[in-house]
Image: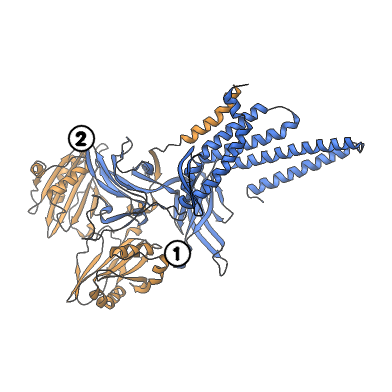
Chain colours: A blue, B orange
């Protein structure tokens, strides 16, 4: 086949070039984390098709990267390249089985990574002792919500992603109780109480935001802290302004309940908060254990005892979550993440944060590695057997005649050893060994 | 064919990755437990203790305002200061944020958490341990605050004012916070008032509801073929901006545009049978109706509002006017 596209995608040179770009991408992406922080560096370098106009720093040497293929472009081209090369060179021969397995395993690895990127989600469940929650919260994503009463004890929530909130933006949607006009938006801020005769009038005309002053802050790139955004939003119904409200996650952090707005006689609650992921079950933090090695700050035992209540399954049980012993439940994995030691030292109510990971494709990388390992084993075994046979033939040594029992015993031993290794790794993977 | 299939796979993958576009979404979720608890009328957590204290010499009790439960003014030859007692939702573990918020208010730089923890002084507040911190402002002003976390609330006792007065009054302030006693009460917390204190005659068909923020009473009126309405009563120490501002605020609530002074007579009339200066406001849009009454009584302004579906409001209008006109 002489199709140039086919020729391009089946080229081994393309594979080598892509792998070289991948190595450079990892290097550049790592350098970018110094100035951009982990999350932003990931977005710019790995979750993009093309990276444009970046500046990097290696020690004190600054150098520009005008254009570079992003992680998606390299990944997808490599996937196309591997798949096409696999098809082109596929031959149903015994000596090629190992190669085919290795190719399939690498393709599975790439697809697994894609699956993880598309479907996985990480959030946090922060609880004080005795507190119950049926949702986890995103660490970096926020939502502006409008809630109205639904069948008790529920409410209907219309959620606007934070990315929609830009100064001057007008958000119209039939699901919203009113048109939302964003008068001001900031990615990060701090708030303080409005000082009488010191601060000018508030842009907010309604709600507790009238008593607060917002001080915009630059975007934080620190892994340990988070941006707390704010917006002044004006609600407009039937062409008439209902007022301007300050919305910011700070209000919730101060314990202020969602702000109530009456729209055409109907009460609507609004809140700008961390994006929530509701669960069909609730988690109550019963007890926290927080031990460190004496004289150090090295954690020895962080443990959260929680109660899981799932009415749909008539389930009510207690379980311990601690380091390296996550809870796997309803397709989610709960890891022990942080513990409020400082608060405990001050005699306050202890709290614990669990990292909640949803990754339906979590098995794909393991399956890919299994297949690659098996392929390598088959391929090397085939070559070793061929090499030994040739060597024996060249030396003129007669094949030892030990009847049929020898080879059968050797193969049984080999199969047993392989089976043992696969079983051991699999059990370890699922936390049983 | 094989070529197409081979290239289609990563293409589809690339498209699916590129199509992760965010959108406005709607979902049903349980109400927040913390806030749902606040709305429950039978929840003891809703109650706020009644406070008693021994008032230091020279302190004058003043109007507590909307947020505080008690305010005191101190005037001496050296200047002025004030004391207030304010309960907020429990801020346990957020002491650093609270202290820094006050520091910034008086123009001081924020402190690190360690510095703040080190600066907190143990004191006795209402018979239990609390923490005290002091902030000297840049403009010869000073704040001394004692805080105590109690149940689902954090109580703040603040002495603020001219530096000389605050320093002189500090011993009296410490005695005062020690003398405070909190007696558990089942009165609603949203306001210092409670409708239990009023002798008004509530129509039999009205069903009392838990008052919301800034309200002293709230009632549900009977449904009329699915049409619902509610009555609410608020009291303010002033007329909150005058008749026009109040009318326009109510107009906004039912989606009507603002009007000018000249249009007021078309929606406002004096309320017969009530004290002088009382007015009745009637507003309506396509489906909803609002009947409001503003009645000045003994340096306070009573705001009554009947709001809801037009049919339900129409049926209760007369009962509402009688209720608003009756002495509280």
Location of residue A3 in the rendering, given as x and y in whole percent from the top left corner: 59, 22
Mark 1 vs mark 2: same chain?
A: no
**Mark 1, other Cα within 10 Å: few <14 / some 14–19 / many ≥20:** some
State which chain disc 1 sits on: A
- Work out whether residue A337 or residue B106 is closer to the camera in this orientation and state it: B106
- Quarter that holds the C terminus of chain B: bottom left
Dividing the picture into quarters, in which one does residue B266 lie? top left
* Residue B303, visible in the rendered structure: yes
Kindly state the secondary structure of the residue where label 2 is placed: loop
CB within 8 Å, label 1 to label 2: no
A365 vs B298, left or right, is right
B216 vs A358, left or right, is left
* Residue B223, visible in the rendered structure: no
Location of residue A131 in the rendering, given as x and y in whole percent from the top left corner: 44, 56
**Vertical side of B262 occupied by B6: above or below:** above
**Vertical side of B301 occupied by A105: above or below:** above
The residue pinned by badge 1 equals A343
B40 vs B320, left or right, is right
Dividing the picture into quarters, in which one does residue B289 lie? top left
At a point 35% along the width and 45% down the height, the residue shown is A144
At a point 18% along the width and 50% down the height, the residue shown is B304
At a point 77% along the width and 36% down the height, the residue shown is A382
B272 vs A212, left or right, is left
The residue pinned by badge 2 equals B286
State which chain disc 2 sits on: B
Mark-to-mark CA distance, 1 and 2? 54 Å
Q: Judge depth for marks 1 and 2 and give the one in front.
A: 1
Location of residue A156 in the rendering, given as x and y in whole percent from the top left corner: 36, 41
User: How many marks on residues?
Assistant: 2
- Quarter that holds the N terminus of chain B: top right
């Amino acid at each position: 086949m002489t199709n140039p596209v086919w020729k391009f995608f089946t080229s081994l040179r393309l594979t080598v070039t892509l792998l070289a770009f991948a190595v450079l991408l990892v290097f550049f992406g790592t350098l970018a984390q110094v100035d951009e922080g982990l999350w932003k560096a990931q977005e710019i370098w790995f979750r993009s098709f093309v990276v444009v106009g970046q500046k990097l720093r290696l020690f004190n040497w600054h150098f520009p990267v005008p254009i570079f293929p992003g992680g998606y472009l390299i990944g997808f081209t490599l996937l196309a390249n591997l798949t096409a090369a696999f098809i082109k060179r596929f031959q149903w021969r015994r000596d090629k089985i190992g190669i085919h397995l290795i190719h399939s395993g690498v393709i599975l690895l790439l697809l697994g990574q894609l699956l993880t990127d598309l479907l996985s989600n990480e959030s946090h469940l922060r609880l004080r002792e005795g507190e119950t929650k049926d949702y986890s919260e995103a660490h970096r994503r926020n939502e502006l919500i409008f809630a109205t009463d639904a069948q008790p004890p529920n409410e209907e929530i219309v959620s606007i992603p934070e990315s929609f909130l830009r100064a001057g933006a007008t958000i119209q949607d039939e699901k919203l109780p009113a048109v939302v006009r964003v008068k001001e938006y900031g990615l990060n801020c701090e708030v303080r109480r409005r000082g009488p005769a010191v601060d000018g009038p508030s842009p907010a005309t309604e709600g507790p935001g009238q008593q607060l002053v917002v001080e915009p802050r630059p975007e934080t790139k620190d892994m340990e802290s988070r941006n707390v955004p704010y917006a002044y939003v004006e609600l407009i119904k039937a062409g008439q302004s209902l007022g301007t409200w300050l919305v910011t996650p700070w209000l919730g952090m101060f314990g202020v309940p969602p702000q109530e707005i009456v729209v055409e006689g109907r009460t609507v609650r609004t809140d700008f908060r961390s994006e929530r992921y509701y669960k069909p079950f609730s988690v109550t933090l019963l007890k926290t254990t927080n031990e460190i090695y004496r004289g150090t700050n090295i954690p020895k035992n962080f443990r959260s005892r929680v109660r899981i209540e799932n009415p749909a399954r008539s389930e009510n049980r207690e379980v311990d979550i601690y380091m390296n012993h996550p809870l796997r439940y309803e397709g989610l994995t709960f890891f022990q993440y942080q513990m409020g030691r400082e608060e405990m030292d001050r005699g306050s109510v202890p709290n614990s944060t669990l990292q909640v990971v949803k990754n339906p494709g979590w098995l794909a990388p393991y399956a890919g590695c299994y297949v690659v390992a098996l392929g390598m084993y088959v391929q090397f075994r085939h070559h070793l057997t061929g090499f030994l046979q040739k060597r024996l033939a060249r030396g003129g040594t007669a094949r030892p005649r030990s009847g049929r029992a020898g080879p059968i015993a050797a193969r049984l031993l080999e199969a047993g050893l392989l089976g043992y290794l696969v079983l051991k790794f699999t059990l370890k993977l699922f936390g049983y060994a | 064919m094989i070529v197409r299939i081979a290239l289609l796979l990563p293409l589809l993958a690339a498209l699916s990755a590129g199509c992760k576009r965010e959108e406005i979404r709607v979902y049903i979720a349980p109400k927040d437990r913390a806030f749902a608890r606040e709305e429950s009328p039978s929840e003891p957590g809703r109650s706020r203790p009644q406070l008693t204290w021994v008032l230091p010499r020279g302190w004058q009790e003043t109007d507590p305002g909307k947020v505080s439960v008690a305010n005191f003014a101190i005037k001496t030859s050296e200047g002025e200061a004030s004391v207030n007692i304010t309960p907020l939702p429990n801020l346990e573990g957020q002491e650093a944020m609270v202290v820094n918020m006050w520091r910034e208010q008086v123009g001081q730089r924020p402190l690190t958490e360690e510095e703040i923890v080190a600066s907190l002084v143990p004191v006795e507040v209402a018979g239990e341990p609390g923490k005290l911190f002091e902030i000297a402002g840049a403009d010869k002003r000073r704040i001394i605050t004692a805080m105590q976390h109690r149940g689902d609330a954090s109580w703040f006792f603040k002495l603020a004012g001219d530096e000389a007065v605050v320093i002189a009054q500090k011993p009296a302030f410490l005695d005062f916070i020690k003398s405070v006693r909190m007696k558990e009460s089942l009165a609603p917390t949203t306001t210092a008032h409670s409708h239990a204190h009023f002798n008004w005659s509530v129509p039999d068909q009205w069903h009392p509801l838990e008052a919301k923020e800034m309200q002293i009473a709230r009632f549900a009126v009977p449904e009329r073929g699915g049409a619902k309405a509610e009555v609410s009563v608020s009291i303010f120490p002033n007329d909150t901006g005058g008749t026009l501002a109040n009318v326009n605020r109510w107009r906004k609530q039912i989606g009507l545009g603002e009007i000018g002074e000249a249009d007021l007579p078309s929606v406002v009339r004096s309320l017969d049978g009530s004290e002088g200066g009382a007015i009745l406001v009637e507003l309506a849009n396509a489906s909803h109706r609002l009947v409001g009454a503003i009645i000045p009584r003994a340096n306070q302004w009573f705001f009554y509002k009947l709001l809801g579906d037009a049919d339900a409001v129409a049926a209760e209008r007369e009962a509402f006017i009688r209720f608003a006109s009756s002495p509280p």
